[in-house]
Image (cartoon, grey):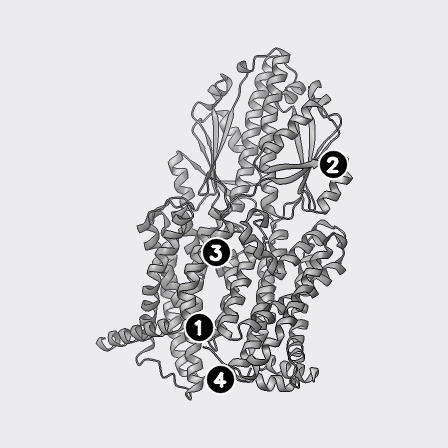
């Protein structure tokens, strides 16, 4: 009888394109979008401008050095601050660097003129990169001027260097020394997207039994056993989604050599539990709201909010407590935490064992809620 | 012509009734654009992340090293969570996620600083979240520069050079559009525009899908459909959605940034005029792709995931200058791409409508293109019989 339901479901999902679109094509398209769009890892050569009001050899040298940087690309030389701001507003540049009038004269005279730079942070990533490039340039420029003036006073080059920068900090970004953005975005947003599609397709295929009035026949195929009905219906989808999930992983870790510092087995197990947890989440929602409109609306809501709530970019501990707590009702949160520790950091699975257990909690809750199906499925009511 | 206007008016009136009688569509047209911005704002409203736990391995144990750690603890970004006895103990803390970074001060740090050599401190940072790394990195860079200034003055005084006699330069950074470098102020304005487009698309596709459901029930005819040419229906419906969305757009683009005190320096006339073609283009785009909705509930499956794709194609998170031609052009076809960039420039950077002519014109071009597509799609849909659905 389990296989009767499985066979019935296979017939259903091949009877029209939308099931295969939702299960296979959408995740495949989005995987290609992410991996290809973010392929470079770091959007270098940020368009920027320089406003040189000094027009001296020193300011020209600074301009040349800025142009030689990997991070920024000086596309414009503006004559005034106003013009530069206009270019920012028009979206042509992400920031500009201002060398004030009489800069060289005042610098050598010890009057401490100010180099200012402006970064458009409405675009966070390029804005931050421009900031990094400009800051480095401002510091080196000021260092060079100070060093020259010290050497003129008779201090040796080496000592002058130490006087300018008596201490330094060496930064070691662990496991992602290239600060590759694709590692962040692809490896969190793709599981998030998989979760969204699993929520939607699970809720869709269950509630369509109500809309088309086929639910009694479904339950009959399972000889009246709700658990057999649900397991048999979702089993083919579990396999398909697992295939998609493993495909995503091989695209990232195999094809594109994303960092995989831990055990692949740990990640594969996490993917399996994650797919089942997402299906269980949707099963639970459909048990509470057995009609297509509310079940699908709520699945869309949680699936989309998960991209923010699961804290892929903005950490949970910085959210308000009453908001951040919702992070932990989402399967993708646990998968993400496992990914961070096992795949990125290469920490033994032992440290994240509780997250695996948490993923196992979802099917248990769904099982407890499944008796609610009996009434909804034997007397289906379609609410438009 | 008179007939055409009459048919348009009838289509407008019919669509208006359909929208207010359909709870599902009302969810998309009202609850979603009213609720989502609030939820998103609540998630991101704390804006910055602070007091990140950082461990210290201090093998120097000198006045210099202790002072450095004290200053690190005093920054907004960092909170020293404890002294580890060795790097391997600190590593264990990191594996347990008790700390997100380790400051390692070598035994010879103080000696080197005193001798006039360069003292080097190591900073190991977790890379799980970019925001944490960036916050700690900029705090540590600031701290390094401040420490250098202190030590430099000390060294120059000892060498007998008055610090005022040497050349010096100051630097100052300004952040445009998001002066506090907050996360909500950066992401929200763009999301607001995306919410407008996506909720229109969802509602429109649900209405079109419902019409097919009705035709399926009534032998191929939708009893609630109106008479008239396809162009009249498209114009009537589009006007109806636009009228619904004008107050919503005012709420989403004006009041939401006001409620949460997000950057909001544009002029209301500028962004309101700017957003009008976005609303029209989104409504037309929804009708142009109506063949994707074979029934009411299809809207969820074909539209919801595109929010994520459109967010990335808009260039808000990944800049458009770094995209290849394929994705650039796909982005060009999405109204929200132009809408996000233009609205952000007006709202965050204080641009005027005149400076947004590229984005504004592109939106009107999309209106024209999608109008033609919508009329074609509508007449095609009228001609093709609906297929029965079994699953």
Chain letter of disc 2? B
Report the front residue among B132 and B11.
B132
Residue of label 4: B387
Q: CA distance from mark 3 to mark 1?
A: 23 Å
Q: Depth-wise, is mark 3 or mark 1 nearer the camera? A: 3
Report the front residue among A126 and B321.
A126
Chain letter of disc 4? B
Q: Looking at this view, name the residue that lies furthest to the left.
A: B2
Q: Depth-wise, is mark 3 or mark 4 nearer the camera? A: 3
Q: CA distance from mark 4 to mark 2?
A: 69 Å
Q: Looking at this view, name the residue that lies furthest to the bottom.
A: B219
Chain letter of disc 1? B
Residue of label 1: B206
Q: CA distance from mark 2 to mark 1?
A: 59 Å
Q: Depth-wise, is mark 2 or mark 1 nearer the camera? A: 2
Q: Earlier in the sequence, mark 4 or mark 1?
A: 1
Q: Earlier in the sequence, mark 2 or mark 3?
A: 3
Residue of label 3: B39
Disc 4: CA contacts within 10 A as few (<14), some (14-19) or many (>=20): few
Rendered location of residue B62, percent (x, y) = 71, 24
Judging from the image, what secondary structure is the residue with disc 2 in? Answer: loop
Disc 3: CA contacts within 10 A as few (<14), some (14-19) or many (>=20): few
Judging from the image, what secondary structure is the residue with disc 3 in? Answer: helix
Q: CA distance from mark 3 to mark 4?
A: 39 Å
Residue of label 2: B84
Asked if A148 appears above or below B287 in the picture, the reply is above
Quadrant in which the C terminus of chain A is drawn:
bottom left
Do the residues indicated by labels 2 and 1 lie within the same chain of the protein? yes
Asked if A55 appears above or below B295 in the picture, the reply is above
Disc 1: CA contacts within 10 A as few (<14), some (14-19) or many (>=20): many
């Amino acid at each position: 009888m389990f296989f009767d339901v499985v066979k019935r479901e296979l017939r259903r999902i091949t009877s029209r394109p939308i099931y295969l679109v939702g299960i296979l094509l959408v995740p495949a398209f989005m995987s290609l979008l992410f991996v290809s769009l973010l392929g470079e890892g770091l959007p270098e050569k940020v368009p920027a401008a320089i406003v040189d009001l000094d027009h001296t050899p020193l300011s020209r040298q600074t301009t040349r050095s800025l142009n030689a940087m990997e991070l920024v690309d000086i596309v414009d030389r503006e004559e005034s601050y106003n013009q530069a701001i206009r270019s920012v507003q028009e979206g042509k540049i992400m920031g500009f660097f201002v060398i004030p009038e009489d800069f060289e004269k005042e610098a050598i005279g010890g009057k401490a003129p100010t180099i200012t730079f402006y970064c458009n942070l409405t675009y966070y990533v390029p804005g931050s990169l421009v900031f990094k490039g400009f800051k480095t340039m401002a510091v080196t420029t000021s260092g060079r001027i100070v060093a020259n003036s010290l050497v003129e006073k008779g201090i040796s080059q080496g000592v002058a260097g130490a006087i300018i920068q008596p201490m330094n900090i060496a930064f070691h970004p662990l496991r992602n020394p290239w600060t590759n953005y694709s590692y962040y975005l692809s490896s969190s947003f793709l599981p998030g997207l998989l979760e969204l599609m699993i929520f939607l397709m699970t809720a869709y295929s269950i509630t369509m039994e109500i809309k088309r009035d086929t639910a009694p026949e479904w339950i009959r195929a399972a000889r009246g056993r709700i658990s057999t009905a649900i397991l048999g219906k979702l089993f083919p989808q579990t396999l398909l989604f697992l295939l998609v999930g493993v495909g995503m992983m091989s695209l990232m870790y195999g094809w594109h050599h994303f960092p995989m510092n831990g055990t692949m087995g740990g990640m594969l197990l996490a993917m399996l539990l994650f797919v089942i947890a997402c299906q269980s989440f949707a099963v639970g929602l459909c048990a509470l709201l057995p009609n297509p409109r509310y079940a699908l609306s709520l699945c869309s809501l949680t699936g989309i909010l998960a991209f923010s709530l699961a804290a892929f970019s903005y950490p949970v501990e910085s959210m308000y407590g009453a908001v951040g707590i919702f992070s932990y009702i989402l399967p993708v949160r646990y998968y993400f935490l496992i990914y961070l520790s096992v795949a990125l950091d290469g920490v033994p699975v032992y440290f994240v064992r509780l997250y695996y257990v948490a993923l196992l909690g979802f099917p248990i809750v769904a099982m407890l809620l499944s008796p609610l199906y009996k009434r909804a499925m034997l007397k289906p009511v379609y609410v438009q | 012509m008179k007939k055409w206007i009459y048919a348009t008016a009838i289509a407008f009136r019919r669509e208006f009734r359909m929208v207010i009688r359909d709870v599902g569509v009302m969810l998309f047209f009202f609850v979603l654009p009213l609720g989502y911005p609030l939820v998103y704002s609540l998630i991101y409203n704390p804006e910055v992340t602070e007091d990140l736990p950082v461990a210290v391995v201090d093998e120097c144990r000198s006045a210099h090293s202790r002072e450095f750690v004290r200053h690190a603890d005093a920054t907004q970004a960092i909170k020293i969570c404890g002294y580890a006895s060795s790097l391997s103990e600190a590593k264990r803390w990191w594996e347990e996620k008790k700390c997100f970074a380790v400051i390692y001060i070598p035994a010879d740090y103080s000696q080197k600083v005193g001798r006039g050599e360069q003292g080097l401190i190591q900073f190991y940072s977790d890379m799980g979240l970019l925001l944490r790394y960036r916050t700690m990195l900029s705090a540590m860079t600031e701290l390094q520069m401040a420490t250098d200034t202190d030590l430099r003055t000390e060294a120059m005084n000892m060498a007998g050079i008055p610090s005022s006699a040497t050349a010096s330069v100051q630097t100052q950074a300004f952040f445009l559009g998001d002066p506090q470098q907050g996360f909500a102020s950066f992401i929200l304005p763009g999301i607001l525009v995306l919410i407008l487009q996506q909720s229109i698309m969802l509602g429109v596709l649900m209405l079109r899908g419902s019409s097919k459901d009705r035709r399926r029930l009534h032998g191929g005819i939708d009893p609630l459909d109106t008479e008239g040419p396809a162009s009249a229906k498209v114009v009537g419906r589009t006007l109806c959605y636009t009228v619904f969305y004008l107050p919503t757009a005012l709420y989403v683009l004006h009041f939401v940034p006001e409620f949460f005190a997000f950057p909001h320096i544009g002029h209301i006339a500028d962004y309101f005029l700017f957003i009008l073609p976005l609303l029209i283009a989104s409504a037309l785009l929804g009708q142009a792709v109506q063949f994707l909705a074979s029934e009411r509930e299809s809207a969820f499956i074909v539209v919801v995931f595109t929010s994520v794709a459109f967010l990335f194609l808009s260039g808000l998170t990944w800049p458009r200058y770094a995209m290849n031609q394929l994705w650039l052009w796909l982005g060009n076809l999405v109204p929200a791409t132009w809408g996000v960039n233009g609205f952000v420039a007006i709202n965050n950077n204080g641009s005027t409508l005149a400076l947004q002519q590229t984005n504004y014109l592109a939106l009107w071009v999309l209106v024209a293109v999608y109008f033609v597509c919508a009329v074609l799609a509508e007449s095609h849909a009228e001609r093709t019989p609906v297929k029965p659905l079994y699953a």
